[in-house]
Image (tube, coloured by chain):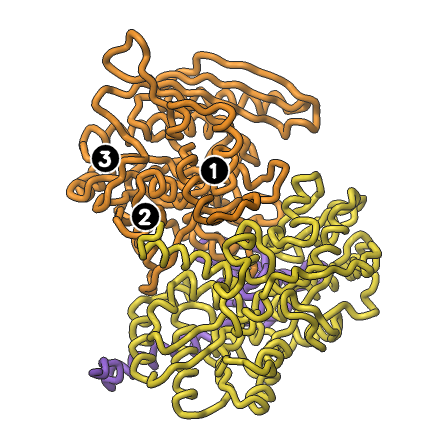
Chain colours: A yellow, B orange, C purple
Amino acid sequence: MKFLDEFRDGAAVDKLVRAIRNRVTRPWTIMEVCGGQTHTIVKYGIDEILPEAIELVHGPGCPVCVTPLEVLDRAHAIASRPDVIFCSFGDMLRVPGSRGDLLQLKSQGADVRVVYSPLDAVQIAATNPAREVVFFAIGFETTAPANAMAVALAARRGLTNFSVLVSHVLVPPAIAAILDAPDNRVQAFLGPGHVCTVVGFEEYEPLVARFRVPIVITGFEPVDMLEGILRTVEQLEAGEARLENQYGRVVTRAGNTASVALIADVFEVCDRKWRGVGSIPGSGWRLRDKYRAFDAEERFSVQAIDTEESSICISGLILRGQKKPHDCPAFGTICTPETPLGATMVSAEGACAAYFAYGRLKAAHAGAV
Amino acid sequence: MSDSATAKVLVSELLGSCPAPFAGYDRVLLGHGSGGRLSADLVSRLFLPALGNEVLNRLEDQASCVLPGLESARLAITTDSFVVRPIFFPGGDIGRLAVHGTVNDLAVGGATPLFLAAAFILEEGLPLDDLRRIAESMQAAAAEAGVTVVAGDTKVVDRGKGDQIFITTTGIGLIPHGRALSVASARPGDRVVVSGTIGDHGMAIMSVREGLEFETALESDTAALNGLTELMLRSCDGIRAMRDPTRGGVSSALNEIAAASGVGVELVERALPLRDSVKAACEILGLDPLYVANEGKLIAIVAAAQADDLVSAMRTHPLGRDAAVIGAVVAEHRGTVVMKSVAGGSRIVPMLAGEQLPRIC
Amino acid sequence: MCLGIPGRVVETFLEHGILMGKVDFGGVSKRVCMDHVREAKPGDYVLVHVGFALAQIDEVEAHRVFAFLEGMDQLGELDEIPR
């Protein structure tokens, strides 16, 4: 596949790794923000081929993992209703709320459907006029244009049976929260490539200025990530702190202006709770008043549902790179990929889930199996 | 099914000494049918305690039994249910799939498939034309495979209680003496061979599912493999085991072999045969082809010295044109499958927990 | 939030006043919303996330890293530093 395969080329990867090796003179801690970037690291074994001096900390860039418990409980409440067809991206179906996950709800008879695109949910609403169709609109900025378009399309088509449960989260406030934490160890960031494809990277310049850390907006394939890491290491070794764009084939400073405009029309900034981290001010988007008619929380009166997070789970500390999964007493015992307590075990790319898999391999190597 | 040993290994690894229940589910989930860890769990914790015996507990794809009075061969028996939706899909239908699936379960055990019995559960309201198409398709598939459907049964359930049609097929065959394939027989040094491109069937089904439709229909690879397996077993005496990687994909089959044989498996990503269209469909939905079902492919574990010759022999058969060595059995990381990626680093290929779902993240 | 895949625009058309398209990904086509990449024409490549085209792919920029690596090769910058 063009513009994909060449960015997985082993020879190019090799060259970049050697270039990184030649630049590194001391240890560095770099965080990749996006869950998709973590996925690439795990899938291609990238931390295995990097010099040991480079530590990659997996960031909170997984909107699935950070969806707060209360939003999941509200989703559960809505999806339980017999008149509702609840549409969601596949990722969300296995995330546990207080009463189980959406997949379990499906097994109890709820009409829960996986869709590839928010626009597919609009189509389901159009072809099922007698049912209420709700779309679980989660995501970072990347998914906002599609979610906003779903609302705009439903409005345009005059659909009265379509609504969205919104839980959008924004990256820059999360990065600020990480860097603000007193024992932060992260020295540089690989910025979220697809987020910036949509909204551009202007918002990251103040972060670089304020915290004096290199941020390199990076893509998702192995060549992208290694080039991003190389550029980051070059800055760190030279004591620089600049914003760079590695992913220039789709990322520009201003982003996609049409998307930015539609997002501004449909959404407005709000405070958002991040699972395992807590509330980060101004870190979310919610539907604007003019689109209240499409707000599922209002339509189904679930705003009052509030929930307590697990007290054992230390996802927040792990997401900020302050603790490792092995530091958690629940890790591997009551908290496993099948029975996750928090964000970082929920997603296959979460730090805890990734360590779980790698840990088994290391133990196996040591003959412990 | 050969999931018991796997389930035991995984459960003990995951829980250590923790007495907490393995999973908090008290009802059947779709994931229990996915061929991954949940399926293995259901077998080991529910079915085997109730039904287990010396033969069943081996959990091979087919049971091989000594039949009193039959000296020259062992009897092979297998059973399978087919619940695929849609019932007519690009490249096949539920009837054809049923015949192929059962023939293949016998064939990968080294059996010559002979007879099938087919039981149908029909939903009130199913068009008879559809049923006729399916029955005729089964006959055609059986004739191609050289087997005969010798017994059958039909039941009807109320509208709304049966999702059109379910088919259960039981197959009987004979394993000549001297053949002793088993998932517990893999040894370090052996090679892992696949008969062709992976993920074709599962992505064909995905490509027509509501909410995930593609404009291009991918085709299922459903096929009877007994002709290929006979060719393989006649030309090579170093085959330890064969599996057909259906639900749960190549990953499930290899994880089961690794666990049953107490060995590690190392795959090479670059060597995996993959159709461009299947690869593209997997990329779009964020799926891993190693976990996607195949219905016309097999995995073989073969002695290293004979691997290349076996692949050459397979490539002379229409169903083995894309056969390839995709990895090796090793003594390290026993019970675990590891894959070396095209970028050079490695990752674990764990047994899938439940269904693989499309992702956006 | 990340799964974005490059595909080639085959055709575009209006539906309910919104620009949609058929995009080909290595032989497999899917319906994609093209409303925010109106300048993309058949034959151009776009980045698609959840059935929505986020941006057109800049083919010149896409070659940049490979030219860079070739340049490094020629300068001998990729030789291992003896340790």
Residue, disc 2: B334
Cβ atoms at labels 3 and 1 below 8 Å apart: no
> Are labels 3 and 1 on one chain?
yes
Which residue extends farthest left?
Answer: B305
Residue, disc 1: B40
Amino acid type, label 2: Arg
Amino acid type, label 3: Ile
Of the pair B356 and B95, the residue shown nearer to us: B356
- The quadrant of the rendering that contains the N terminus of chain A is bottom left
Q: Nearer the viewer, mark 1 or mark 2?
A: 2
Residue, disc 3: B239
Q: Nearer the viewer, mark 2 or mark 3?
A: 2
Residue A85 position in % (x across, y down): 73, 47
Q: Is residue A7 visible?
A: yes
What is the secondary structure assignment of the residue under circle 3?
strand
Q: Is residue C61 left or right of residue A321?
A: left
Q: What residue is shown at x 38% (from left), y 49% (from top)?
A: B275
Gap between marks 3 and 1 measured at Cα: 25 Å
